[in-house]
Image: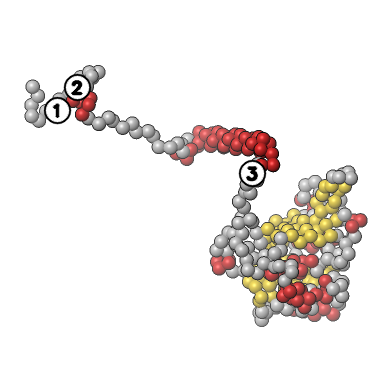
Amino acid sequence: MAGRGEQRTRPCGAAPGPAEDHGAAPERVLFPPAFSVSEIKNKQRRHFMFLRWKQQQRKEKLANKKKRKKEREVLGDQAPPKPVPKTIENQRVYDETTVDPNDEEVAFDEATDEFAPYFNRQTVPKILITTSDRPRGRTVRFCEQLSSIVPNSHVYYRRGLALKKIIPQCIARNFTDLIVVNEDRKIPNGLVLSHLPDGPTAHFKMSSVRLRKEIKRKGKEPTEHIPEVILNNFTTRLGHSVGRMLASLFPHDPQFIGRQVATFHNQRDYIFFRFHRYIFKSEKKVGIQELGPRFTLKLRSIQKGTFDSKFGEYEWIHKHREMDTSRRKFHL
């Protein structure tokens, strides 16, 4: 007999007794937690398992796509519409300043703003392109290529002359716009666009500058034909003003025989500039060939009147901490 303080043990392999078989609760089987690739310690093994997981995800996605395609073919006209993927653009927060083409107030503002003489064909654009003091070779080449795609534009270097002294000389010589390309560490990083003689002046941050020789599969040099201008996705009042400012750089009545087009595409408040040429492959197929240069602009501020860094009155300033609170809110 076992003592009072001793425990009874059952020999290994022996069947449980009647009391142990029916009276005690069955033991629960504990499974390991869900498998996670990040728990693998070995880096090579973890990378291999991650690639296998991605491959499996692609196979499942492709299989579901084929399954839905077959279902749509069977149902025909009764098939449900394709789901629209969620993107930042179509989930954009509604802006109260979105322009309505039929709005009388917008039409009145356009008829009386600083760009009305251009759109009424009363003035012909004449552009002066200059740089910051002592520009480097890349900035100089960029200005030369920019002048080759903007008709009736002239490149002059400042040589230490202040912008406040340049602007009166531009007005006296009937220039309608002034473009200043700034650089930092030999790379163009900013652009100031001032509409003459009464403004406004826009300050842009410039990035992703690519010259012609840096573009793959580029076409031949641009011709002197006046290009078409495409302004895409400038929907708010602010974006409308910026679009009119950019459009006023190019003359009216594009020469379609040149097959050249300048595009300003606004996406998430970044303005992408591209310069293409149409290539007619056949009567039904048309391709495009990039000529360059290309760059990206980000609006920083809009100032009333011409350039004045000390006493200028600003219409709009981009304040990062206050305006960029949501990724789905855009201003242009």
Disc ID at residue 212: none
Residue flagged by tag 3: what amino acid is it?
Answer: Pro
Residue sitting farthest toward the bottom: 311
Q: Secondary structure at mark 3?
A: loop
Image coords of residue 155 (percent x, y)? 83, 67
List the residue tagged with mark 1.
7
Closer to the chain start, of discs 2 and 1, is 1
Residue in the picture at 84% in, 80% down: 172
Residue in the picture at 90% in, 60% down: 255
List the residue tagged with mark 3.
80
Q: CA distance from mark 3 to mark 2?
A: 63 Å
Question: For the C terminus, which image quadrant?
Answer: bottom right
Whether residue 137 is visible to the viewer of this picture, yes or no, is no
Q: CA distance from mark 3 to mark 1?
A: 70 Å
Depth check: 24 or 277 in front?
Answer: 24
Residue in the picture at 22% in, 30% down: 24
| Relative horizontal placement of residue 237, taking residue 283 as reference (left or right) | left
Image coords of residue 73 (percent x, y)? 68, 36
Image coords of residue 240 (percent x, y)? 72, 68
Q: Quadrant of residue 68?
A: top right
